[in-house]
Image (cartoon, rainbow, N blue to C red):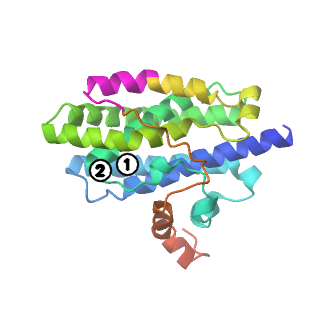
C-alpha cells in the first residue's frame, strides 16, 4: 500500500469513527429523558452500539494514526475531529433525533453493504460485523419516521421542521474527502456519488410514504474539519472525566 493510499485510508477510518462517537454521545444524552421507558432503553442501546462501532474504526486506524481509541476520542480538540456537522447538532426534540438517526442509519446501511466487498479485507470484515447491528438501528428509526410523519398534525409538523433543518446537513455525508479517489481506485471504498444515489433510492420513497418532503435547499458542503460551535461544548462534556484523570485505567 503506497503512502497516499495509507493516508486516504486513515482519513476515512477516522472520519467514520468520529461520526459514530459523536452521534453515540448525542444519543446517550437521551438516557433517562426519552418519551417512554421502552425508548429510553432502546436509545441507550443504540448509543452504546455507535460507540462500539467507533471503537472498531479507531482500532483499524491505529496503525496509521499511532493513537489508540481513547486518545482519539478523548484527547483531541474539535478542530482535529472529522465528523460531519449533522451528528454534532444538539438533539432538539424526539422528532429531530429520530430523523437524524434515520438519515444517518440509511447512509450507514448503504455504506456498510458496499464495504463488505472492499478489497481491503479488514475493512470488509469490520463492515460485515457492524452491519448486523445497524440493521436494528435502521428498522428502529424507520418506524419512528413513519409513526411521527403519519401521526398527529403536531408530530407531522415537527418531523417536517426537522427534515427542513437536517436535509442540507445530511448531504455533507457524500462530499468526497481530498484523497477518496485513491480509495475508490483501489476498490477499498465506494464512489461517494454512487453511495448518495443508493441512499436517495431508499430515503426518498420512505419519506414520501411518511408524507414528508425534503426541502429545496442548498447542501451544506462544509469540509469535515469545519465544525459548528456545538462540537466544542459536546467535547467539553464527553471528554471531561478522561481529561480530569488522564492516567486512569477503566
Image quadrant holding the N terminus, namely top right
| Label number found at residue 41 | 2
Label 2: few (<14), some or many (≥20) within 10 Å? some
Q: Nearer the viewer, residue 7 or 24?
A: 7
Which residues, given as a range, are shown in magenta?
201-214
Residue 237 x, y percent position in the rendering: 45, 69
Image quadrant holding the C terminus, namely bottom right
| Label number found at residue 45 | 1
**Residue situated furthest bottom in the rendering:** 244
Residue in the image at 42% along x and 23% along y: 202
**Residue situated furthest right in the rendering:** 2
Total residue callouts: 2
Label 1: few (<14), some or many (≥20) within 10 Å? some
Asked if one can make out residue 56 in the rendered structure from this viewpoint, the answer is: no
Looking at the picture, does residue 166 appear above or below residue 142?
below
Q: Confirm or deny contact between disc 2 and disc 1 (CB under 8 A).
A: yes
* Dot 1: element: helix
Residue in the image at 56% along x and 27% along y: 195
Asked if one can make out residue 237 in the rendered structure from this viewpoint, the answer is: yes
Looking at the picture, does residue 204 appear above or below residue 68?
above
Residue 98 x, y percent position in the rendering: 32, 42
Residue in the image at 56% along x and 35% along y: 174
* Dot 2: element: helix
Q: Nearer the viewer, residue 100 or 132?
A: 100
Residue 182 x, y percent position in the rendering: 76, 33
Marks 2/1: CA–CA distance: 6 Å
Amino acid at each position: 500500500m503506497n503512502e497516499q493510499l495509507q493516508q486516504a485510508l486513515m482519513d476515512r477510518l477516522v472520519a467514520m469513527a468520529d461520526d459514530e462517537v459523536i452521534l453515540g454521545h448525542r444519543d446517550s444524552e437521551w438516557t433517562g429523558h426519552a418519551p417512554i421507558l421502552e425508548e429510553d432503553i432502546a436509545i441507550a442501546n443504540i448509543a452504546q452500539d455507535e460507540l462500539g462501532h467507533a471503537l472498531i474504526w479507531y482500532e483499524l486506524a491505529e496503525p496509521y494514526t499511532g493513537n489508540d481509541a481513547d486518545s482519539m476520542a478523548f484527547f483531541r480538540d474539535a478542530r482535529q475531529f472529522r465528523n460531519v456537522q449533522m451528528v454534532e447538532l444538539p438533539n432538539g426534540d424526539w422528532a429531530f433525533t429520530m430523523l437524524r438517526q434515520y438519515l444517518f442509519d440509511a447512509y450507514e446501511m448503504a455504506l456498510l453493504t458496499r464495504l463488505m466487498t472492499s478489497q481491503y479485507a479488514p475493512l470488509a470484515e469490520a463492515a460485515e460485523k457492524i452491519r448486523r447491528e445497524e440493521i436494528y438501528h435502521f428498522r428502529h428509526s424507520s418506524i419512528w419516521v413513519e409513526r411521527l410523519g403519519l401521526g398527529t398534525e403536531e408530530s407531522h409538523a415537527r418531523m417536517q421542521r426537522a427534515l427542513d433543518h437536517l436535509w442540507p446537513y445530511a448531504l455533507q455525508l457524500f462530499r468526497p474527502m481530498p484523497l477518496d479517489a485513491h480509495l475508490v481506485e483501489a476498490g477499498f471504498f465506494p464512489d461517494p456519488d454512487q453511495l448518495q444515489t443508493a441512499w436517495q433510492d431508499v430515503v426518498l420513497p420512505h419519506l414520501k410514504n411518511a408524507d414528508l418532503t425534503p426541502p429545496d435547499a442548498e447542501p451544506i458542503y462544509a469540509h469535515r474539519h469545519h465544525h459548528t460551535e456545538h462540537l466544542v461544548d459536546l467535547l467539553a462534556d464527553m471528554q471531561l472525566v478522561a481529561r480530569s484523570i488522564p492516567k486512569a485505567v477503566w
